[in-house]
Image (cartoon, grey):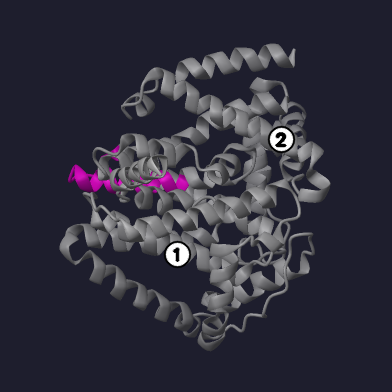
Amino acid sequence: MEYLLFAGYLFLFAWLVTRVKFFTRSGLSKSQLIIILLLKVLAGIFYGWIGIYYSGHARMWDTWNFHTNGLYEYHLLLNNPHDYFTNLFQTSYADGFSRFFESSDSYWNDLKGSFFIKLLSVFNIFSQGHYYVNVIFYSFFTLFGAMAIFRVMNDAFPGKRLTILLATFLIPSFLYWTSGIHKEGLIFTGIALCVYSIYFGNKEKRFSARKITALAAGLLLVLTLRNFLVVLLLPALLTWLLANRYPQKGKWIFGIAYLFFVFLFFTAKHLSSRLDFPQAVADKQQEFVKLKGKTTVPIRELEPTATGFLKNTPQAISLSMFRPYPGDVHHFLSLAASVEINLLLGLFLLFLWRRADGSRSGPLLYFCIYFSVSVLLAIGYSNNNIGAIVRYRSIIIPLLVIPMIAQTDWSFISRLIRNSIKKYNNI
């Protein structure tokens, strides 16, 4: 029965992806849209397979835990609908709905898993509880995020469609982590909806009800599934909106705004003890340190002061932007991550060497850089688990890689390679 459901839903969504206007307006052909969906489904299946056969060593059992809990919620819906529809909004903690940034005894910390499990229970209504059928549903819905970013970048970098297409859908870590049944796919979709709404709202000089709804839905997804990202996303979006009004001064607007945000980060605690952001990051680091795993590495303890953050900045950059090193490789997944990060660093060097600026939107680029770097630093300051770092950073890789690849002078590089080959053959 599972095979019949899988084949039927795969055919259905392959047909839908060629009919939904949000996809067809991308300018991609029907065959390209179907291939992209199939790639995501294959990546999601591989993700599930890793979760079964590689979980003990690679720590990949979360996806199947989500599935098991999703089945429980599905049966709760059948047997006790009242509890099913109300338990997402209940808490037994003494502090109620406070402790927004806490990693334990917090409604908000539990919400990310509870909401995701609730979503899987809805999938189970149609899939009859089959994991790999749910992969098709998840691949289809998270495709909206990837397609939103493709449409934005394709408009911002005219004449680079093939380059942007490959950079959007074929970055291995992004495809893998956002296609498997885990939170990253929906988190990225939330971020992408915000980017799409702001970019095209500014271009059209009006924010329609549809774009405002998409923006609100994107923020809600990020808030629900990884609340600390909202603290980084909202300032970036607000600064982008301001820079859109004065695009020629975008560099200065972002620079000054982020100096103010850094100042606010360290001083907001004087307004309210609940706004002690440095302490929240330090506490988050300690929570990760307590979680012993095969990919955890020793790190310097973070002091919740400006000096402490400054001392830990080189460590944070190393953790989130350069690791895993070759010495961190312990299995296939860490090998793949190490190879990828070094290839991306190589592409960055090519970009610095032969840059061909073709962007229509400077503020978009500044948003991508400032938001992505702030996320990477937040990960590096708080996390010492290489596996988790690779997963967490996957959601911002397209925001850095696509503009970088789109602005690299590939025609010059290809000519250089061809000339080198000709010279070698003539020797």
Q: Position of residue 145 (x, y in %)?
A: 45, 39
Mark 1 secondary-structure assignment: helix
Residue that badge 1 annotates: 373
Pointer 1 or 2: first along the chain: 2
Real-space Cα distance between discs 1 and 2?
Answer: 30 Å
In the picture provided, is 420 more to the left or to the right than 280? left
Looking at the image, residue 187 lies above or below residue 369:
above
**Residue 192 belongs to magenta span:** yes
Q: Which mark is residue 48?
A: 2
Residue drawn at point x = 54 percent, y = 56 percent: 342
Residue drawn at point x = 56 percent, y = 84 percent: 311
Q: Tell me which corner region of the image, top left, top right, bottom left or bottom right, holds residue 427.
A: top left
Query: Would residue 18 be visible to someone looking at this image?
Result: no
Highlighted range, magenta? 190-209
Q: Position of residue 148 (x, y in %)?
A: 38, 38
Query: Would residue 143 be visible to someone looking at this image?
Result: yes
- In this rendered view, identify the residue nearer to me: 369 or 407: 407
Residue drawn at point x = 48 percent, y = 49 percent: 220
Q: Looking at this view, name the residue that lies furthest to the bottom.
A: 307
Mark 2, other Cα within 10 Å: few <14 / some 14–19 / many ≥20: many
Q: Amino acid at mark 1?
A: Val
Residue drawn at point x = 51 percent, y = 32 percent: 141
**Residue 96 belongs to magenta span:** no
Number of labels in the image equals: 2
